[in-house]
Image (cartoon, rainbow, N blue to C red):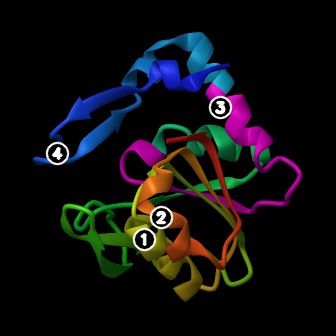
Amino acid sequence: MDFKKYIRDIVNFPKQGIVFKDITPLLKNAEAMHSAANSLFNLIQDKKIDKVVGLESRGFLFSPLLAVKLGAGFVPIRKPGKLPSEVISTSFNLEYGIDTLEIHKDSIAPGDRILLHDDVLATGGTAEAACKLITDLGGEIVQCNFLIELDFLNGREKLSEYTIASLIHY
C-alpha cells in the first residue's frame, strides 16, 4: 500500500518553517490503518519483545496494537506531570525547542527486550531521549520503529547504535 497518499503536510506547524507530517488521514481510513499496523508488526515480528514503549502522543496510536500482536506489555513515555507514580526524566532538544520526557521507574525491568515506537523520526532527539530512559532502567532496545522517517533530518545518526525500521521515508 502507498501510505504516503494518506499523509498530509501542514506547513508552518507547530511553528514557522516546519512542515508537519499529519497522520490523521491514515488513521481515519480503516484499510490504511489496518495495513499500516500489520506492516509495522512485520518490521519486528521475528524478534522476542517484552515491552513496546510508545512516545507521547502519536506513538501511543500503534504501540498498544504492536504490543498485543507481539504478546508484549505496553509502556508509555510521557511529558512531565502526566504519569501518576514515581518517574525518571530526561530533557532534550527538539527541532523547534526543548522538551522533557518521563517514564515510570517500575515500567521496565533490567534485561527487558524493548521495541521503541513513535510516529515520526525527525532529528532523533525525542527517540534518543527515550532510549536513554529505557537503558537507564536496564532495558535492552531491540529495535526502534517509526511510521515515518524524515531522512533529510538525519535522525538515524543519533540512534546509530540501534536497529531502526521505518515504514515511510521522505
Cβ–Cβ below 8 Å for labels 2 and 4? no
- Between the C-alphas of marks 3 and 1, the distance is 24 Å
Query: Mark 2 = which residue?
Result: 154
**Of the image marks 2 and 1, the number of the one nearer the N terminus:** 1
In this rendering, position of residue 34 left or right of residue 9: right
In this rendering, position of residue 21 left or right of residue 3: left
Label 4 vs label 3, nearer the camera:
4
Residue at image position (72%, 53%) is 72
Query: Mark 3 = which residue?
Result: 37
**Of the image marks 4 and 3, the number of the one nearer the N terminus:** 4
Whether residue 123 is situated above or below residue 111 in the rendered picture: above
How far across and how far down the image is residue 25, in percent? 41, 18
Three-letter amino acid code at the position of disc 2: Asn
How far across and how far down the image is residue 37, in percent? 65, 31
- Between the C-alphas of marks 1 and 4, the distance is 24 Å
Three-letter amino acid code at the position of disc 4: Pro
Three-letter amino acid code at the position of disc 1: Ile
Q: Is residue 11 visible?
A: yes
Query: Which mark is on residue 14?
Result: 4
Label 3 vs label 1, nearer the camera:
3
